[in-house]
Image: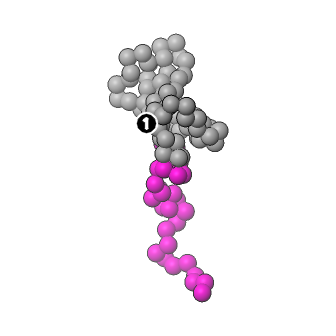
Amino acid sequence: PDEPATEADPSPAEAEAAAPTAGGTVTVEVDSIAQPHAMISGNVTFSDGQKADWYIDHQGRPGMAARVPGYRPTPADISEFQTKLDAALRQAGY
């Protein structure tokens, strides 16, 4: 039988915050010390759980190396990565 929603049901925002990284969202982290060849670097975990290392070199060129050879994230994940990377870089003062 259908039951009405109760106060114990999480809000959509609470449910999203509790959702695991794999299978849903893209997370971006910025390294506290950049890789030697980079001005800034970090890593990304894509919605399928695959990880990649990203960097911006001293000429401002972006790059990314998947940890699994040949891995290609989905276009939706790339778009979300770009948005979250922009926010992370702004927060870090870049």
Can residue 91 be seen here? The reply is: no
Q: Which residues are magenta?
A: 1-27
User: As drawn, which residue projects farthest toward the front?
Assistant: 69
| Crowdedness near tag 1: few (<14), some (14–19) or many (≥20) residues, C-alpha within 10 Å | some
Residue 32 pos. (x, y %): 35, 29
Residue 31: name its quadrant. top left
User: As drawn, which residue projects farthest toward the bottom?
Assistant: 1
Can residue 4 be seen here? The reply is: yes
Which residue does the image show at 52% across and 42% down from the upper left?
46
Q: Give the residue number, with chain letter if any, for mark 1.
A: 29
Which residue does the image show at 52% across and 12% down from the upper left?
59
Counting the numbered discs, the total is 1
Q: Is residue 19 covered in magenta? A: yes
Which residue does the image show at 43% across and 36% down from the upper left?
29
Residue 45 pos. (x, y %): 48, 41
Name the residue nearer the viewer: 42 or 64. 64
User: As drawn, which residue projects farthest toward the right?
Assistant: 75
Main secondary structure type of the part rendered in magenta:
loop
Residue 82: name its quadrant. top right
Task: Reply above or below: 1 against 49.
Answer: below
Residue 55 pos. (x, y %): 47, 24
Task: Reply above or below: 61 against 82.
Answer: above
> Which image quarter is the N terminus in?
bottom right
Which residue does the image show at 53% across and 17% down from the upper left?
60
Residue 51 pos. (x, y %): 47, 38
Instruction: Give left or right: position of 65 versus 2.
Output: left
Amino acid tagged 1: Glu
